[in-house]
Image (tube, rainbow, N blue to C red):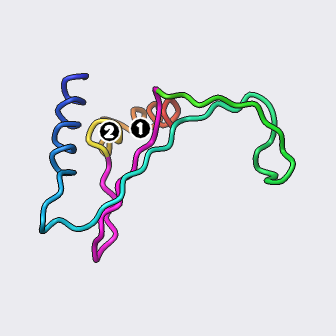
């Protein structure tokens, strides 16, 4: 729900506040892009027409650490499912 999302944003924002003992971190955002025409992967002469979509994005925060830890988002990245059918349905819908 929206309330849960806003609560998580507040918690994550509090974690992002600089503390003396906190290690360095970098956060970056990549907005979704809708490719209409063309092939951007050829790298040299590919002509494309595409749009950025500001309402959809991926965000990553990298924090200095001795170990690699991948932490899923509590709302957007479920790690438990009621059944194999639920996993399949969510995977087909959201990727």
Question: Which range of residues does the magenta coloring cover?
Answer: 55-72
User: Is 46 in front, or is 5?
Assistant: 46
Tell me the crowding category of disc 1: few under 14, some 14 to 19, or many 20 or more residues within 10 angstroms, Cα based. some
Left or right of residue 68, residue 30 in this image: right
- Count of labels in the image: 2
Residue 22's x, y, as percent?
17, 65
**Mark 2 to mark 1 CA distance (whole Å):** 6 Å
Q: Earlier in the sequence, mark 2 or mark 1?
A: 2
- Look at 60% across and 34% down and name the residue there: 33
Pointer 2 residue: 81
Q: Is residue 65 above or below residue 59?
A: below
Which quadrant is the N terminus positioned in? top left
Residue 45's x, y, as percent?
87, 48
Q: Is residue 62 above or below residue 52?
A: below
- Look at 40% across and 39% down and name the residue there: 84
- Look at 30% across and 54% down and name the residue there: 71
Q: Secondary structure at mark 1?
A: helix
Pointer 1 residue: 87
**Within the image, what quadrant is residue 90 found in?**
top left
- Look at 54% across and 28% down and name the residue there: 53
Circles 2, 1 touching at the beta carbon (< 8 Å) = yes
Tell me the crowding category of disc 2: few under 14, some 14 to 19, or many 20 or more residues within 10 angstroms, Cα based. few
Left or right of residue 21, residue 62 in this image: right
Q: Secondary structure at mark 2?
A: loop
- Magenta stretch containing residue 70, yes or no? yes
């Amino acid at each position: 729900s929206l309330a849960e999302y806003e609560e998580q944003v507040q918690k994550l924002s509090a974690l992002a506040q600089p503390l003396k003992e906190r290690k360095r971190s970098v956060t970056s955002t990549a907005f979704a892009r809708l490719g209409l025409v063309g092939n951007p992967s050829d790298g040299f002469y590919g002509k494309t027409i595409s749009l950025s979509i500001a309402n959809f994005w991926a965000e990553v925060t990298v924090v200095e650490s001795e170990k690699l830890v991948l932490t899923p988002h509590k709302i957007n990245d479920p790690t438990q499912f009621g059944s194999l059918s639920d996993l399949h349905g969510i995977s087909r819908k959201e990727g």
